[in-house]
Image (spheres, coloured by chain):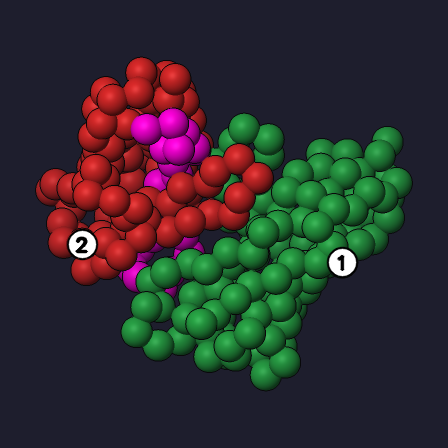
Chain colours: A red, B green
Amino acid sequence: GAGVSQSPSNKVTEKGKDVELRCDPISGHTALYWYRQSLGQGLEFLIYFQGNSAPDKSGLPSDRFSAERTGGSVSTLTIQRTQQEDSAVYLCASSLDRVAEAFFGQGTRLTVV
Amino acid sequence: KQEVTQIPAALSVPEGENLVLNCSFTDSAIYNLQWFRQDPGKGLTSLLLIQSSQREQTSGRLNASLDKSSGRSTLYIAASQPGDSATYLCAVRPGVDSSYKLIFGSGTRLLVRP
């Protein structure tokens, strides 16, 4: 596609429910990243994919968070048993390789009520 | 540990003014530096990528400079317009093992008044 696409753009969920956030990177980009931006906070690194592998998952806040990438393309970030502190904007980015220019999607705004 | 700081946190200027946004980083061993803009409620738009071996990059009214040894980058915006109002973020990639990881500053919120 023309850019990085994320869905849904907005998600409201009840505390304790599971949610899945999707990212479609730019075609041909081997590197994919997830970041989180909480209200009034900076961008927090969550996970990095190179192809389908995740060499760095160090930013995932807890074991309720997981992510996968399939076919070297689409990635899904899953949050289990959501908590109110998970409310944030989740941003996905991709780049041609691990050091090339990064392009971000529009983000998914997650609200846990 | 690499830390990125952006000053000022907020800036308000009249339309037409030239302005400079500042970004500093604590570890000069970077691979590259990227400037983004973020409009309210939106994702990040890439503006310029400057490699560690480069001194500057230009795109239209934007010019980014890099002084790696002093740990500084500036984003110069010429002839500012109300449409330039946004938050501007700089991010560095470390020059060693975790070069894939963008480390962000907290941004400068720019308002260009008509």
Q: Can you identify the residue that label 2 sits on? A: A54
Task: Specify the segment rendered in magenta.
Answer: A83-102
Residue in the image at 57% along x and 70% along y: B25
Q: Residues within 10 Å of mark 2 (few under 14, many from 20)?
A: some
Q: Is residue B100 above or below residue A9?
A: below
Q: Is residue A86 above or below residue B45?
A: above
Residue nearer the viewer, B11 or A94: B11
Q: Can you identify the residue that label 1 sits on? A: B20
Any magenta on residue B5? no
Name of the residue lying farthest toward the bottom: B69
Residue A51 x, y percent position in the rendering: 17, 52
Residue nearer the viewer, A83 or B66: A83
Query: Does any portion of residue B21 appear in the rendered image?
Result: yes
Q: Which residue type carries mark 1? A: Val
Q: Secondary structure at mark 1?
A: strand
Q: Which residue type carries mark 2? A: Ala
